[in-house]
Amino acid sequence: MGCKEDSGPNTKPVVPGETISVTVSPAATRLGRGGTYFFSATVTGANNPAQTVTWSIVQKNKHAQTTINANGLLTLSAEEPLNSLTIRATSTVETARYGEAIVTVTNEELIPSVNGVTVSPPSAQVAKGRTHSFSAIVTGANSPSQEVIWSIVQTNKHEHTTINSSGLLIVDFAETLTSLTVRATSAADSAKFGEATVTVTASVIGANCPECGAEVNTALWHNAQEAVCVEAGTKELRCSGCHAVLDTDTIEPLGHEWGWEITIPATPVQEGKEEEKCLRCGAANGNSRSIPKIPGGVGLTITVNSDGKMTSPNATITGGVLILKRNATATLVLENAVEYTNIQWRVQNTAVSGSGSSFMINGNNAAFLIGRDYFVTVEALRNLAPVGAAPYNVTIIFKVEE
């Protein structure tokens, strides 16, 4: 569990001639093996220094699967041998300046807990009649839920000044308040919330449409170009009477939504791999982690040649039929795969994802009935001479036994 132990900031002090100081929050915490925890860093100093930092773990003899990513998310291996770790955040402005936090490694039960909520941006100016998007990050131990409840603190605001469940603030044309406080409250722990301050400015357009005279406060925003992860979109305020465009505004980029994608499946004989990628656009951020081998199984490697013949030093192939034990896996490898492109594997005529030069059959798949024949088809196109050669198309027959 990530229970904070307040021992004060562990920060390298500023010395004469240096202007940057980095503080890591929390300064100390406990975390169970196999858990995760979000850390944050604050950079202070003269001339409003950039808040960007590089995260690292000081100990070099830690477990290989104990990592911290670019966002300050620490992932602790279930097999971490160390009982204490030092997390470091180094300023990108002055790389000699850093802050540290101490993590006490325990075997405590992995219960998600919320440490705090950070709203971004922390402040904004929004004109009457315009909108602004806010986002929130919930920090804590063991991957706490990122769900938040958005609200506006002021109860005397205009009834049509609202913020929706996605953090989109709409300031009504008739809003009389000059300042608003936007709040994001953790859905998992209502005592934890973050806030942002909004300065309300005058409307950039008049009270009535210049084309037809309809009241501007009845106009509606429409998306003209959708925003994507790293590119802004645009929206238009259209008159409710004549649909004239009264105003335009920017839709802020959505930002990446990170999630883990298996790029190399684990087998009984080798570890797999998964990479952190954006669930929307597929971009990778360079973070990866190993997937443990599948326990209790026997892994077979079978080479498939262009005639459909299967060869393997440790597999039973009788009459062209691969016999696969229930607790085993068989990795089919296309011989001379470099000669082919657009490789596609199919099981019982159903295409499978992740097609490439190899494909794994898992005998533990309950869909495979004992003793029944199944087939895998591999299709590909030749990319070498002779030009116009027929596509490669081979069927492999297999069945599962206890």
Image (cartoon, helix red, strand yellow):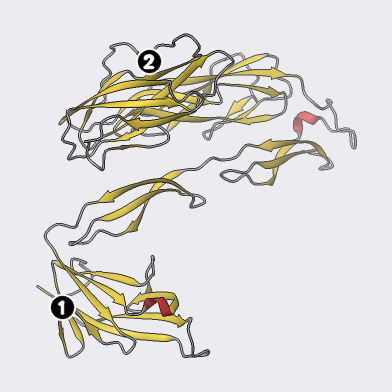
- Split into 4 quadrants, where in the image is the C terminus? bottom left
Q: Quadrant of residue 157?
A: top right
Q: Residue furthest left?
A: 402
Give me the residue at 32% from left, 18% from top.
Answer: 27
Please, what secondary structure does the residue beneath circle 1 have?
loop
Neighbours of disc 2 within 10 Å: few (<14), some (14-19), many (20+): some
Q: Observer-nearest residue: 30 or 158? A: 30
Q: Earlier in the sequence, mark 1 or mark 2?
A: 2
In the image as oriented, which residue stretches furthest toward the front?
17
Instruction: Look at the numbered disc 2 and give the secondary structure of its residue.
Output: loop
- Callout 1–callout 2 Cβ contact below 8 Å: no
The part of the image, by quadrant, that contains residue 175 is top right
Q: Amino acid at mark 2?
A: Lys
In the rendering, at what x and y percent does residue 95 appear?
A: 45, 26
* Percent of width and height locating residue 184: 48, 25
Q: Is residue 321 above or below residue 331?
A: below
Q: Looking at the rendering, in which quadrant would you find the N terminus?
A: top left
The residue singled out by tag 1 in the image is: 313
Mark 1 closeness class: few <14, some 14–19, many ≥20 residues within 10 Å: few
Q: Amino acid at mark 1?
A: Pro
Question: Which residue reaches farthest right?
Answer: 211
Nearest the viewer among 125 and 391 is 391
Estimate the x, y position of residue 193 in percent, counting from the top left. Answer: 43, 21
How many numbered discs, if any?
2
Q: Is residue 181 above or below residue 225?
A: above
Residue 251 appears left or right of 12: right
Residue pictured at 56% horizontal, 26% vertical: 121
Mark 2 lies on residue? 12
Disc ID at residue 398: none
Quarter-of-image position of residue 265:
bottom left
200 or 11, nearer to the observer:
11
